[in-house]
Amino acid sequence: MSAEETNENKDEFTDDGEETGKETDEETNEETRIQGLDDVRMSFLSHLGELRRRVVFSLAGVLVAFLICWAFKYTLFDFLQQPLILAAPEMQDAQLHQKDLAEVFFTLLKTCLLAAVFLASPIILYNIWKFVAPGLYPNEKRAVIPFMTLGTLFFFLGASFCYYLVIPLGYGFLYEFSAPVADPTLMIDEYFALTTKLLLAFGLVFELPVATLFLSGVGLLTHRTLIKQWRIAVVVAFILAAMLTPPDVITQVMLAGPMLVLYLISVVIAYVLTTRREKRLEAEGLL
């Protein structure tokens, strides 16, 4: 065999080896990419399954609480009617009206459902915590009891602030404003829909410091971000107040005002937790 044929055979072998190596690398990269996509898909499905499980547990807690509240439906009905009596004492003997026979039944259902949400709020908060807990450090996971306690406390505190102060003042203003013009005919469904919406809105708004406490504790939120976005917070507060309250200035200000105060409290909480966290990381040489 001549030297030229030998070189040609070597070249062919080299080309075949390079092509085979390229094909192997491409196959390996493709397998790695597919495996990565499978891991992402499995992780997503796992999180989705956990979310579904936590939602089911929360709904089960609300259902049990609803059955308990249904035994006291008329008491709860009278309880939600008290702010109207405080707002307009002369209406104490007045009756709420209904458009059809089923309206009272569905109003009682909504009333008991609202009470069930408040009664089951510790269970709901616990399941929220269990959903996010896998992504936390062991020392952060131990905060479940304070999170549930503070979350429930502030939820009830917000609803109480609305029930004993905001609703009587707001409804009283609206009643006095309309009394010289017309004798109001209050429909039961509309009254309880507005009242329950206000109670839930104030309960959720008062959760702002608790949410800040959690997010700042895990390093997802700092006081710098809150201070930087204060203008947006003011605008959002008044927009939400306008959307969630009756069209009067008093109730809007009484929702937007506490919201901004809670935002300021959240800034202080974030500052304390962020400063403490950064000092600890700096001492450990991680910052």
Image (cartoon, rainbow, N blue to C red):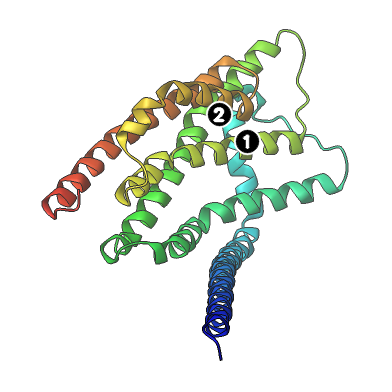
Q: Can you give x and y, in whole percent of width and height, for residue 40 in the image? A: 55, 67
Classify residue 40 as left or right of residue 73: left
Q: Can see residue 279?
A: yes
Q: Can you give x and y, in whole percent of width and height, for residue 118 in the image? A: 52, 52
Query: If the image is split into quadrants, where does the N terminus sit?
Result: bottom right
Q: Can you give x and y, in whole percent of width and height, for residue 272 in the image? A: 22, 39
Classify residue 44 as left or right of residue 143: right
**Where 194 sits versus 232, above or below?**
below
Q: Residue furthest right?
A: 100
| Residue pointed to by mark 1 | 195
**Amino acid, disc 2:** Ile
Foreground pick, 73 / 55: 55
Q: Residue furthest left?
A: 283
Foreground pick, 266 / 97: 266
Please tell me how crowded label 2 is: few (under 14), some (14-19), or many (20+) other residues with Cα within 10 Å: many
**Where 83 sits versus 4, above or below?**
above
Identity of the residue drawn at 53% across and 69% down: 36
Q: Can see residue 265?
A: no
Disc 1 is placed on an element classified as helix
Classify residue 117 as left or right of residue 97: left
Q: Residue furthest bottom?
A: 1
Identity of the residue drawn at 52% across and 78% down: 14
**Amino acid, disc 1:** Thr
Identity of the residue drawn at 48% across and 37% down: 205
| Residue pointed to by mark 2 | 167
Q: Are marks 1 and 2 in contact (CB under 8 Å)?
A: yes
